[in-house]
Image (cartoon, rainbow, N blue to C red):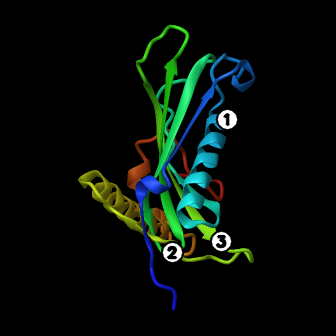
Amino acid sequence: MEKLRYKYKKESSVELSQLMLPTHANYNGKVHGGFILSMMDQIAFACASKHSEHYCVTASVNTVDFLKPVEVGELLTLKASLNYVGNSSMVVGIRVVSESIIHGDKDFKHCNSSYFTMVALDDNNEKVNVPGLILETETDIRRFTKSIVRQNMQKQRHEEFSEEDFISSKYLELIESHKVRIQINSRVC
């Protein structure tokens, strides 16, 4: 039986900076959200692979809210670190900030944050156990706990809204104040 190893968060933390070019922009002159998401996926992979010492795949992305637009000419910096480890899965927390380097302005603009769940695989694409995580600060404990709670909430949502068990009549009152009209079998509700 393999002895469980533990690693410090700093051993797998990754930071990536890239200048945003016109080729990264949409028709409105802002950097494409999809380009930023691609960078986030890359840094999540790097962080999880460093920790697990295996190839990792993205299992899920939890809420990406684009808080502020990223402009062409800004330096975009992504910071990734582990928030949680399971048996083969890891939650990578990512923070994205940008700064204007032309104006010498060192005001960092928080653009978004997200959580990527990554799974470590062996050479046969089978899940592999990952090292444990050493928590050193109150923030580390909070982030680890928050990941557990988020996972439990996601399981509850999946169970409550499973296609087999969902009963729409339980939710009609909830949705009636929204901009929707229900029309089932040519009957308008």
Residue lying farthest to the top in this orientation: 103
Identity of the residue drawn at 51% across and 86% down: 2
Question: Which residue is denoted by mark 2 in the rendering?
Answer: 165
Q: Earlier in the sequence, mark 1 or mark 3?
A: 1
Q: Earlier in the sequence, mark 3 or mark 2?
A: 3
Pick the residue in front: 8 or 166: 8
Give the x, y percent position of residue 16. Answer: 57, 38
Tag 1: residue type? Phe
Q: Nearer the viewer, mark 1 or mark 3?
A: 3
Identity of the residue drawn at 74% across and 77% down: 124
Give the x, y percent position of residue 13. Answer: 48, 50
Identity of the residue drawn at 65% across and 54% down: 186
Gap in angstroms between the C-alphas marked 3 and 2: 33 Å
Question: Which residue is denoted by mark 1 in the rendering?
Answer: 35
Label 2, residues with CA under 10 Å away: few <14, some 14-19, many ≥20 = few
Secondary structure at numbered mark 3 = strand
Whether residue 183 is visible: no
Whether residue 44 is visible: yes
Q: Is residue 66 above or below residue 155?
A: above
Label 1, residues with CA under 10 Å away: few <14, some 14-19, many ≥20 = some
Residue lying farthest to the bottom in this orientation: 1
Query: Is label 1 in contact with label 2 (beta carbons under 8 Å)?
Result: no
Gap in angstroms between the C-alphas marked 1 and 3: 26 Å
Q: Earlier in the sequence, mark 1 or mark 2?
A: 1
Give the x, y percent position of residue 179. Answer: 49, 38
Identity of the residue drawn at 45% across and 80% down: 4
Tag 2: residue type? Asp
Q: Quadrant of residue 170?
A: bottom left
**Residue 121, label in figure:** 3
Pick the residue in front: 26 or 127: 127
Q: Quadrant of residue 73?
A: top right
Q: Nearer the viewer, mark 1 or mark 2?
A: 1
